[in-house]
Image (cartoon, rainbow, N blue to C red):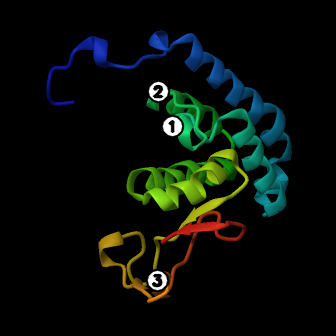
Amino acid sequence: LTEDSDAASVLTPERLSDEHRLIGRTAEEFIDNEVLPVLDRLEAKDWTLARELIRRCGELGLLGTDVPEAVGGVALDKAASLVVGEAVGRSASFATTFGAQTGLAITPLLCFGSGAQQAKHLAGLVSGEMVGAYALSESGSGWDALSAKARAVPQPDGSFLLSGEKMWITNGGFADLFVV
């Protein structure tokens, strides 16, 4: 915003590829036909339905747009993810469920997960067979990750002992995997 930039580097709707438009149309049709008609059930915390819709997103390739094919993704790009996110954003609380799955469970595993963690969890998250959640907020620190008091202490068997508390965990009521 404070420096000149090359106009060719700016993404605009006119520059979307046919592939971007196709995945965007797929996402729009999914939201219009499968999510918006049942929004009242989602708002009433029908977690079984939320899981079914996440699984359907996986079947359509909406959860793994910029995830490598080697771990079950579609291997497109960030522009494809933006197009999908724009379509999903119209769906009230389901947009939060979707965003937690893609941005708060899949992305941390891609960026920071070990090879073993990626092999164990990514395909299930990208397919929608598993639902992910992200546990950040605490009563004393809110969303300030640097002020968090909870700790994960490694155990001799390779597991971790978690201390502290977390609250307001998106997808927390029905998730299979928690990023803490």
Q: Is residue 62 above or below residue 172?
A: above
Front position among marks 1 and 3: 1
* Residue receiving disc 1: 68
If you read the primary sequence from the N terminus, does the residue marked by circle 2 or circle 1 appear first? Answer: 1
The spot of residue 109 in percent (x, y) is 47, 56
Q: Residue at x 60, y 64 (%)?
A: 170
Q: Quadrant of the N terminus?
A: top left
Q: Amino acid at mark 1?
A: Pro
Give the class, few, some or many, for how many residues have Cα within 10 Å of label 3's Cα (few <14, many ≥20): few
Give the class, few, some or many, for how many residues have Cα within 10 Å of label 1's Cα (few <14, many ≥20): some
Q: Disc 1 versus disc 3: distance between alpha carbons?
A: 36 Å
Front position among marks 3 and 2: 2
Q: Disc 3 versus disc 2: distance between alpha carbons?
A: 36 Å
If you read the primary sequence from the N terminus, does the residue marked by circle 3 or circle 2 appear first? Answer: 2
The image quarter in which residue 37 lies = top right
The answer to the question of whether label 3 and label 2 lie on touching residues, with beta carbons closer than 8 A, is no
Give the class, few, some or many, for how many residues have Cα within 10 Å of label 2's Cα (few <14, many ≥20): some
The image quarter in which residue 112 lies = bottom left
Q: Secondary structure at mark 3?
A: loop
* Residue receiving disc 2: 79
The spot of residue 157 in percent (x, y) is 49, 86
Q: Residue at x 41, y 84 (%)?
A: 154
User: Is there any visible trace of residue 164 in the rendered image?
Assistant: no
Q: Amino acid at mark 2?
A: Ala
Q: Residue at x 79, y 40 (%)?
A: 36
* Residue receiving disc 3: 139
Q: Disc 2 versus disc 1: distance between alpha carbons?
A: 15 Å
Q: Nearer the viewer, residue 114 or 20?
A: 114
Q: Secondary structure at mark 2?
A: helix
Q: Is residue 142 above or below residue 10?
A: below
Q: Residue at x 69, y 46 (%)?
A: 127
